[in-house]
Amino acid sequence: MRIASLNMQNLRLLPDGSGGHLHGARDRDDAESPAHDAADRRLTAELLAATGADVLALQEVFDAESLDAFHDRYLAQVADPYPHRLCLPGNDGRGLDVALMARRRWEGASTHAELLPSDLGLSPLKGMPEDQPVFRRDCLEARFGALTLFVLHLKAPWPDPKRAWELRRLESQAVLRLLPRDPEALWLLVGDLNEPRGEGERAIAPLEAAGVDLGLRLPEDRRWTYYEPHLHKHNRPDVMIASQALAARFPDAVPRVLYRGLGREAGQGARLPGVGEHRPHASDHAALLIDLPGL
């Protein structure tokens, strides 16, 4: 099985009176022209096609309609289809959810968007309403044979970095309570955990301690997945954390980072034809993929 993960950067079907058009790979508060939107989504499809993945774990997808439109209009034109698709409503105030596309049917899939801290034996943060869900978006869980896959997108480190750290820590503790307890269980956490660079304790440390961060198997200069153009710095918010049993079963499994969809400003290698200095681009995140033969 090959699994790939990508933050789609605001994939949303926008109404236009003729079936809608897809929002480009740009932030909603970005003043850029939408003139590159169609080119962006063509590049997103080409990047995902290049992964050759059996399962695509995606972040920042508005809804199932947006996911289907992207698949049918763009991805299916450059890759074999993904007949199994899932995007369930989450808690993001902007409507950006996590999603799955797969070429093989999962045995079970469930959202955890409605879980409260108290449901998991956790206390809400100070000032947090007791009925506020613990996940800022969702923790989407899907079983593919012996493997349990968790797709995550944790709280971004703004507008209040300290509060955001506390929320990511709470989300991390919640994920721990959802992981299979069997020490021989095969599970994989993938997605955008939004952990910024820094010298202090990491909010996601509980998740890193629970499993094996497969990205650390890469050379240090090949681990980054995101370029901050305003700071001219690279970061690694996108991760693949495997259970101890999964990591031991695949000691040679090393993630690959596909930079070819990023704007040329980010550096690091060749790009897909049509990628610009900043835009058009496939996303502001690189794609991650991992091979797990036999699963």
Image (tube, rainbow, N blue to C red):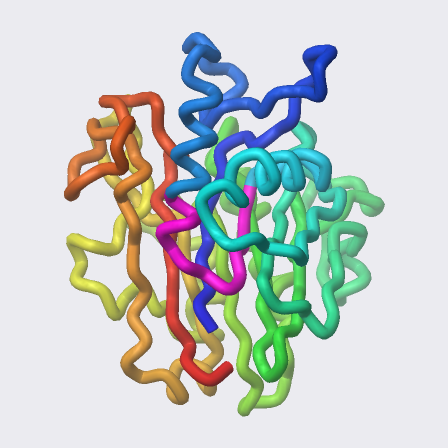
At x 39%, y 41%, the residue is 46
Please give left or right for residue 259 compared with residue 49 in the image: left
Instruction: Using the image as rendered, state which of residue 170 and residue 45 is in the foreground.
Output: 45
Residue 127, located in which quarter of the rendered image? top right
Q: What is the x, y in percent for residue 153?
A: 55, 48
In magenta stretch: residue 79: no
For residue 69, above or below residue 56: above
Q: What is the x, y in percent for residue 47?
A: 38, 44
Q: Is residue 170 visible?
A: no
For residue 20, above or below residue 158: above
Residue 170, located in which quarter of the rendered image? bottom right
Please give left or right for residue 15 compared with residue 209 in the image: right
- Considering every residue shown, the one lying at the far right of the view is 131
Q: What is the x, y in percent for residue 28?
A: 54, 19
Residue 276, located in which quarter of the rendered image? top left
Q: Which residues are magenta?
A: 47-59
At x 65%, y 26%, the residue is 13
Instruction: Using the image as rendered, state which of residue 76 and residue 272 is in the foreground.
Output: 76
At x 50%, y 45%, the residue is 165
For residue 92, above or below residue 243: above
